[in-house]
Image (cartoon, rainbow, N blue to C red):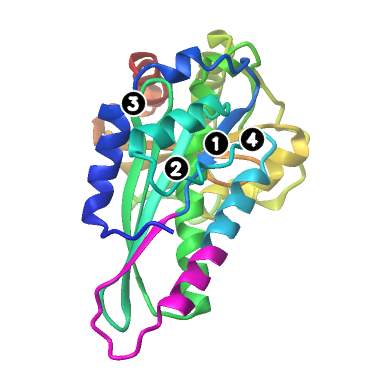
Amino acid sequence: MRRYSLDLLTVTVLGLLLGFGSASADSGAPAARTLGVTIEDFGYLDTSGEPIDQTAAHLGRLQTFMAALRRDVEADGHYRLVPPSTDDRATSAERMRAAAQGGANVLITGAVQKMSTLVQFASAAVVDDDTKRILFERRYTFRGDNDEAWNRAETFLSRDIRAALAAQLAASPAVASTPIALAVFDFELEDTTAAAQASGVAASDAAQLADVTNGVRELFAQSGRFRMIETSGTNAEAVKAHTLRDCGGCEAGIATKLGADQSLIGVVRRVSRTEYTIGFQVRDSRTGAIVSRADSGLRMGADYSWRRGAVRLVKDHLFENRAQQ
């Protein structure tokens, strides 16, 4: 079990990026429709200064933490776990090289540091083995030093890591030939103006929302990277009531039943008769992890401009940005 402070996680990641050569390109690992993922044992350091040495208990919780994280990732059939290097003397570059030679496309590393009796930090980074690009890096603060606190921290960290992996999977050349089955649900209206209807949506607004949804669906269909899943066949209450934006991620389960890999929900927020914002969110249907989300700034224009604004937002964040990566 490596022991280092969270500040040194940055050094560790830099070591992976700067010291790693081209081994992944020469590893001979066959292209697959899955991503190989190596999850290193996270480092641990106690700087709390508590009088009682609790190292054994902490390392036990860390082992449970790592086992849960690996189970979460492996539960999705899109990912293959590649065992990390067991050589404690291996450098960062050597560990990454070993992961690549074992067939890993992505390496996950991290650390936990106990700062005080009640405060701990957890940090994680996801690195692309081939391009050496950091796909995800985040630091978390969690309170408590018991099983519940550690389990809660793992849940948050695991969710974000799986979202990063899902985004990388979608962009991977290994799966580019397999279109993503996507359920684009009808865009919803959140009207905050004084003239908003007490219930339901006006017929004119409903027509504009349908036009927005059609425009976004056409964008995905024309890309060739997605296979559109029909959503009209579901009887889910949140779909019929147009309240998916408030259902706490229930769209993922609905999309799974429809046979979709991912789901997209969108909302038009009317600020005034000539001002609006647009937001969308894409989830991995199997894990519920958020793959992508974006919100526009305040836009000017009547309801006929909603479609143009929504298509532009989705195109900028899901097509043009990804093409530049």
What element does badge 1 sit on? strand
Give the alpha-carbon distance from disc 2 to disc 4, as whole Å.
Answer: 13 Å
Residue 207, above or below 295: above
What element does badge 4 sit on? strand
> Residue 80's mark?
4
Residue 151, above or below 226: below
- Sequence-first tag of 2 and 4: 4
- Sequence-first tag of 2 and 3: 3
| Badge 4 density bin: few <14, some 14–19, many ≥20, Cα 10 Å | some
Q: Is residue 229 left or right of residue 7?
A: right
Residue type at the position of mark 2: Ile
Query: In what quadrant of the picture does the N terminus appear?
Result: bottom left
- Sequence-first tag of 4 and 3: 3
Give the alpha-carbon distance from disc 1 to disc 2, as whole Å.
Answer: 7 Å
Res 239 quadrant in image: top right
What element does badge 2 sit on? strand
Identify residue for label 1: 37
Residue at left offset 42%, top offset 37%: 95
Identify residue for label 2: 108
* 4 or 3: mark nearer the eye: 3
Q: Is residue 29 magenta?
A: no
| Region of the chain picked out in magenta, as a range | 42-64
Residues at discs 1 and 2 in contact (Cβ within 8 Å): yes
Residue type at the position of mark 1: Val
Q: Is residue 61 magenta?
A: yes
Residue at left offset 43%, top offset 27%: 129
Q: Can residue 181 be seen from the camera position used here?
A: yes
Residue type at the position of mark 4: Arg
Residues at discs 1 and 4 in contact (Cβ within 8 Å): yes
Identify residue for label 3: 20
Q: Can residue 308 be seen from the camera position used here?
A: no
